[in-house]
Image (cartoon, rainbow, N blue to C red):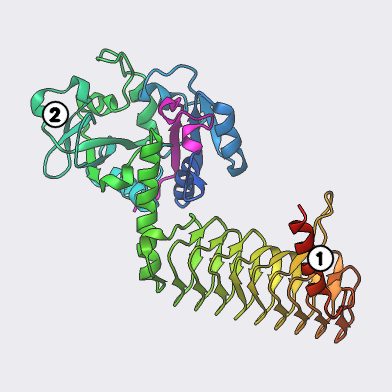
């Protein structure tokens, strides 16, 4: 394996007009994370000395996305081809000495392992001038072709528009991804011309320029799905589908049961424990950790939440950011949690909203209970002690505290604190008038008949 310093250049200057979106193409999400940041995450696993994103149209959006990661940017003011785009990163890499990966922001699924294979091949004993990542799609179409021998030594690379019929018959295609030594990259790029059908400066031309100097290049292959690019909403959906399919298989391989795998949607950072059962039509947003032996029933939506060992969720439950379910706790059908902690063994089985709340171990939240956490201006917390029982259709008006072991009678509107082990009844006394209903019906029937 190479021990050279590593830098990465990620091309993200394209306009992305086929997306028909105000959002920059490379910022459209896959599994809840922008495509560009998927790639940046994979690059970061290699501990690069520098990463440079080449921007163009919509640069402000891209710059804002990568700035928190400490990633540099370089502007390609004119779209003059991939070779020209890479050349714009030269100033940002001034003084860098090592190996350079060239990647594309709209090709988000390239793994760290594949990047490492490219770099290792660059440092192999035959010292190729460049390493190209190739693939064999089901339909080679208009991809550029790589002509290579059985050992992966490249004899020619050619864009489809400039290829002969015999060259177009080759199935090994150029993904556009490359690895090049920094000492070679910009010197070769300075020699690239634009005498071709599109009048552009092609990055792959550096392969043939190196060959003219007597230096060979090499190609390694990967699966077509790993280098799938996104230029339209349909392609975005296809890449999302590929990512989800792989993640579902991984979840099952790691010991989770997915009853209907194709209906479960994960986020890029979802963590699932062993012996978890996930029923159909469950959606995970970013920031979810699910411990062992959890059951997630159908049609639940979970985002930014932590679910403890042995807990039960749903069906039709919604856990929003800040929701924490303790060990063996339960939320049932049509229960919503937000910035709320449900203690070990606590239950909210039906039709409740628990927002900005701390609920103690073993507490029981009756059907229809809500924490009234918002007054139109500020949010307030509700505290419910261990073992407390909240009767159905109760409204707890925050800030309010219900003591440990306390009971709140059904239908109560609680606005002041309730002591430990106390009973709170906040409703008018029930009255009954014998015969009133029969008299009412007779009176109303007579009025209706008189009309």
Residue ID for mark 2: 168
Residue sitting at the far left? 166
Q: Percent position (x, y) of residue 85?
A: 42, 24
Q: Residues within 10 Å of mark 1 (few under 14, many from 20)?
A: few
Does residue 382 show up magenta in the picture? no
- Left/right of residue 54 with respect to residue 134 in the rendered view: right
The residue located at (55%, 27%) in the rendering is 59
Does residue 12 show up magenta in the picture? yes
Q: Percent position (x, y) of residue 412?
A: 83, 72
Residue ID for mark 1: 443
Q: Percent position (x, y) of residue 93?
A: 49, 32
Q: Percent position (x, y) of residue 321?
A: 64, 58
Kindly tell me whether residue 109 is visible in this rendering.
no
| Quadrant of the rendered image containing residue 253 | bottom left
Tell me the CA gap for discs 1 and 2: 92 Å
Q: Quadrant of the N terminus?
A: bottom left
């Amino acid at each position: 394996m190479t021990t050279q310093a590593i830098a990465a250049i990620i091309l993200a200057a394209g306009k992305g007009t086929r997306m028909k979106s105000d959002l920059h193409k490379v910022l459209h999400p896959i599994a809840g994370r922008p495509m560009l940041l998927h790639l940046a995450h994979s690059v970061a696993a290699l501990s690069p000395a520098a990463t440079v994103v080449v921007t163009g149209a919509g640069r402000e959006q891209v710059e804002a996305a990568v700035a928190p990661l400490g990633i540099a940017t370089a502007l390609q003011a004119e779209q003059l081809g991939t070779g020209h785009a890479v050349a714009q990163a030269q100033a940002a890499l001034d003084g860098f000495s090592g190996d350079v990966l060239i990647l594309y922001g709209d090709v988000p699924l390239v793994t760290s392992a594949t990047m490492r294979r490219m770099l290792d091949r660059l440092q192999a004993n035959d010292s190729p001038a460049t390493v190209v990542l190739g693939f064999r799609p089901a339909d080679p179409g208009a991809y550029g072709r790589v002509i290579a021998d059985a050992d992966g030594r490249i004899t020619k690379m050619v864009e489809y528009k400039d290829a002969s019929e015999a060259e177009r018959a080759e199935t090994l295609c150029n993904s556009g991804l490359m690895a090049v030594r920094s000492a070679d990259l910009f010197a070769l790029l300075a020699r690239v011309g634009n005498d071709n059908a599109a009048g552009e400066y092609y990055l792959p031309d550096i392969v043939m320029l190196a060959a003219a100097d007597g230096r060979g290049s090499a190609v390694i292959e990967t699966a077509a799905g790993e280098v799938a690019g996104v230029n339209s909403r349909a392609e975005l959906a296809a890449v999302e589908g590929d990512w989800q399919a792989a993640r579902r298989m991984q979840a099952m391989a790691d010991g989770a049961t997915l009853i209907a795998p194709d209906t479960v949607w994960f986020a890029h950072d979802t963590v699932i424990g062993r012996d978890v059962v996930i029923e159909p039509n469950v959606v995970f947003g970013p920031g979810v950790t699910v411990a062992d032996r959890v059951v997630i029933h159908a049609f639940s939506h979970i985002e930014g939440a932590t679910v403890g060992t042995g807990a039960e969720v749903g069906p039709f439950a919604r856990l929003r950011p800040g929701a924490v379910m303790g060990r063996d706790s339960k939320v049932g059908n049509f229960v919503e949690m937000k910035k709320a902690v449900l203690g070990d063994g606590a239950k909210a089985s039906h039709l409740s909203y628990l927002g900005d709340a701390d609920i103690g171990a073993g507490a029981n939240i009756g059907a229809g209970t809500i924490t009234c956490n918002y007054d139109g201006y500020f949010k307030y917390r509700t505290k419910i002690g261990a073992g407390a029982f909240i009767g159905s259709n109760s409204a707890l008006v925050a800030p309010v505290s219900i003591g440990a072991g306390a009971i709140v009678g059904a239908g109560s509107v609680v606005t002041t604190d309730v002591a430990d082990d106390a009973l709170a009844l906040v409703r008018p006394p029930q009255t009954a008038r014998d015969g009133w209903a029969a008299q009412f019906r007779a009176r109303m029937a007579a009025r209706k008949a008189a009309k």
